[in-house]
Image (cartoon, rainbow, N blue to C red):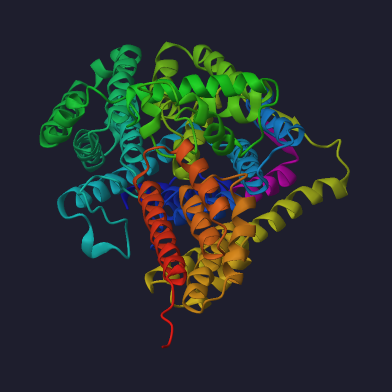
Amino acid sequence: MILGQQLEHDPSLKKPQRLFFVLFGCLFLVAPFYYQPNLGGEGLFIPHNSALWIVASWIIASASFLIYKNQQIILPKYWLGLALLPIGALATGFIAENNNPTEWIVRLSVILGGYLFLISLFQFQLTSKHIERSLYILMAMGLIAATYGVIQTQTGAANLGSFMPVSTKHSPIGIFQQVNLQASFMATFLLLTYYLASRPTLRSFSFLTQATLIIAALTVSYNIAISGSRVGLLGASLGLICLVIGRWKLFRQTKAIFLALTIATILGGVLGKSGLEDTVNKVDRAIGGVSADVRWHIYTLSWDIFTQAPLIGHGLGSFQKVFQEERREYQKQEGNSLRSAPRFSHPHNELIFWLVEGGIVSIIGILAAAVYTFIQLFKTGWQRGWGYASLLFPLTLHTQVELPFYISNTHWFLLLFLLFLTHQHGKKSIPINGLSTSAQRTIPISFIAISIFTTTSLIQTQIANAGIVSYLKYKQSQPQYLRSPLESAYFREYTTYLILRRNMLIGISENNTKPAQDYINWAKNSLTTTPAIVTYRDLAIAYDIVGNTEERDAVLDQALRTFPIHKGLLELQAVLHKKDKKARQAKNDALSSQAQPQATQP
């Protein structure tokens, strides 16, 4: 509220900046906290990701209007170097032959939309004072997210399931439904509290603002500690070291607040010491929650797969397919711990993920964007460079042990804003007078149309998401809930699986094998892109229903060569073998009874 009053009476705020703060507030204070019951997972299965993109699309549309109005576009100094990231992704997306269509569209939309969002931020012509206010808005968001984590650790949020994710294990999963995502998010905000405390302007702020920073440091450090997340603890620790190294002279000018933040951070760690002890005891686990031995096998096998198509990769969305195919032979090695691992949809490393799917073409774009950001950090000077680098560190580290942006677009937009913070120095203005009047008008009209389309599409997507949840909530007895999901391009594949599986199970009771054959036709195609364990399982059941035991056993054999000690698959195999044994025994008994000599009448 205090920040809002300051913005309201700030004479430096013109209409573009006021519009920015309205949209920015919606992006980070409203959209991330939109919640509806969901199945978890990633992408649009997580409701707040849709809300974020709706707001982001209007930020992009507003920026396009400002470009038209001001007859200029403002770009960061290294805009072309940063553009190599989406260019590389687009290139490999169009060149590779084995792209998963849905994954291809979603991935490219997120990357290209992210770049447009980054460029859009420059069009609002924010001053240093405006950017500092933006950071306090982010801090408010971090404090709310940390409060979610505290509630979840204390109560599990069992009575708040309509407003936030429920944590049955009382872990701080925040709005993201995953501990490591909350931890790296909290690590970023812990560093942000120290960064804001190192700014000379803090002394002109009210006591309440300074106290808020201390409370934020306490709550976010508690979240990091109690989570037991190594990626969160390591990101926060190394980030703080970088921040103190770079801005020590500034901290010496604000000794009191720095000391208060340090005490609050230590106190938060002490309160969450059970999580810290758990972190220390994870001697056999790697940073992202995967066994170190398994992680090594994932990296080794992924590298082998990359070398098979090093230039353009295997296609966007292809990792699941190629990795599961190659692991069958790889895990035959004696003592290979990969045998006990689940199905992997990613290699727990962003760079390796892109190497496998996009090859060298895509990785060049990522590395180019990273190199130009390093150059920018160096050119901003010692204090700013170390400060910005420390803020970027936790999220960057997280990308090397998991894929945070695929689950949480909040992390993606936070990273983009921090990149904007880094690249705001040295920006340049390019006039667009060379464009015809019609071309100039087309730019904002096109983006406004795209924003309207994006808004309506994503609202419909979450209606479809709610339909799936309702269908499962009522134990799959109300198929009418699947009408909306079936019309959604994003949810159609999963909805088709639910419908076909339901029909197949109903067909068993009605002695009708056609639904099972329909499932077989769909599953054979689905497994070529997504080798899901449940699809293998139900395909084996479908073959058993139609009486094709040879194909049934072949499917189970293929599944068990991929997931050799999966309990569900082994149990199904045992049940089916027992069923076959009984059938053979019954057949033998029938033949034996027919072979017995019949008694003759006297």
State yes or no: residue 497 in magenta: no
x, y percentage for residue 38?
Answer: 41, 60
Q: Return the x and y of residue 92 as percentages of the image width and height.
A: 71, 31
Q: Is residue 426 visible?
A: no
The reply to whether residue 87 is visible in this rendering is: yes
Residue at left offset 87%, top offset 50%:
438
Q: How many marks?
A: 0
Q: Residue at x 53, y 72 (%)?
A: 503
Q: Tell me what residue is drawn at x 45 percent, y 50 percent.
A: 25
Choose top left, top right, bottom left or bottom right for residue 363: top right
In the image, is residue 67 part of the stretch drawn in magenta?
yes
Picture layout, residue 28 above or below residue 252: below
Q: Residue furthest front?
A: 602
Out of 8 and 309, give the one closest to the viewer. Answer: 309
Residue 110, image quadrant: top right
337 on left or right of 25: left
Q: Is residue 260 above or below residue 155?
A: above
User: From what the image shows, is residue 422 above or below residue 174?
Assistant: above
Give 468 or 117, whichever is nearer the viewer.
468
- Quadrant position of the C terminus in the picture: bottom left
Relative placement, left or right, of 174 versus 535 is left
Q: Nearer the viewer, residue 398 or 422?
A: 398
Q: Position of residue 509 (x, y in %)?
A: 46, 77
Residue 381: image x %, image y %?
A: 47, 12
Q: Main secondary structure of the magenta part?
A: helix
Q: Taking 97 as reference, is 14 above or below it?
A: below
Q: Provide the residue span drawn in magenta.
A: 59-75
